[in-house]
Image (cartoon, rainbow, N blue to C red):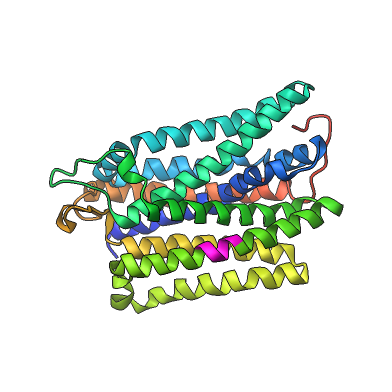
Amino acid sequence: MSLRQIWFVLLGVLLSGYAVLDGFDLGVGILHLGARDDRERRIFMNSIGPLWDGNEVWLVTFGGALFAAFPEAYATAFSAFYLPFMALLCALIFRAVSLEFRSKRPSAAWRKSWDAAFFAASLCAALLFGAAVGDSMLGIPIGSDHEFSGGFLSLLRPYALLVGALNAALFALHGALYLQLKTEGGLRRRVRRWAWHAFGSFLVLYMAVTIATIAALPRALANFAAMPWLWGAAAAEVLALANIPRCLYLGKSGQAFASSSVAIAALVALFGAAMYPNLIASSLDPAWSLTIDNAASSHKTLAIMAAIAGLGMPFVLAYTAIVYWVFRGKVELGRFSY
């Protein structure tokens, strides 16, 4: 395996890490307005309070790795998706501000305003992430100079919006399964019902996106013929999704959340398999696409980065594991809670 291929895989690992970890954060935000009172909404916020900022580090690391390993793809992506990225940045900022500011005043109007902002920011971010995946699958108008020649409205295509809705439903499901681990009593029983509803919505959208992908993008399956082992990711996806309702029925919350995490990671793997070797596909001419070959940094740069990643990743994984271990268990509201 070449260094370019290694970095393509590492980008997938970073994206999977972000989708799994910050996915449930965004899912909790999407479900936030379903809480009945101030105490329940505080429980929701405190379930992710110690974790959300660390989870976002995976996204920052993904952006940094893309910039260093494939700088031309990074430049084209940020040019093409400039307005969506700014909207995403605002959504992530408002989510963070909502968490920090909501409980600073006892006013009901103040808290309701930040509750609405928390929900809207989380939903907007989930939709934008999904739409970006959909646009990447379809390809965007890139010329021979690798410059984006479209506009913002050209990105709002039905397929991209459908994938955005799918992603929002997936994160809502992931968030509900996470909240089952952090809540108890009547709230936990209601969260379990939400998980069933979210799973049903996700399943309908998943089938719709699968059919649309096979019908409109036959090239998405090209790599599966050349590399049959990729079907393993598809099998993992199907088995993980099938295990979620089983675990919900049996009350196995931990296994349900683990299955959801595997399903998300498998979806990212399938996305990478459909795109490879493209990083950004051109809808004007496939020859103008940015690939791991024509968008990569020098061999020396990739080698140095690989050495740094090899040294740094164990520390990141260890830190993440420690944080999740320290803040395990049910949420308990205290003096210093949000």
**Residue drawn 75% across and 67% down?**
252
Instruction: Write down the quadrant of residue 153 in the picture.
Output: top left
Q: Residue 323: image x %, image y %?
A: 66, 45
Q: Residue 261: image x %, image y %?
A: 58, 60
Q: Residue 121: image x %, image y %?
A: 56, 36
Asked if the stretch drawn in magenta spans residue 204, the answer is yes
Residue furthest to the left in view is: 144
Q: Residue 94: image x %, image y %?
A: 56, 30
Residue 208, compared with residue 307, is above or below; it is below
Would residue 14 be found to the left or right of residue 72 on screen?
Answer: right
Q: Nearer the viewer, residue 248 or 149?
A: 149
- Would residue 37 be visible to someone looking at this image? yes
Q: Nearer the viewer, residue 106 or 298?
A: 106
**Residue drawn 44% across and 43% down?**
61
**Residue drawn 36% across and 65% down?**
273
Magenta segment: 201-205
Would residue 102 be found to the left or right of residue 157 on screen?
Answer: right
Would residue 288 be found to the left or right of residue 197 on screen?
Answer: left
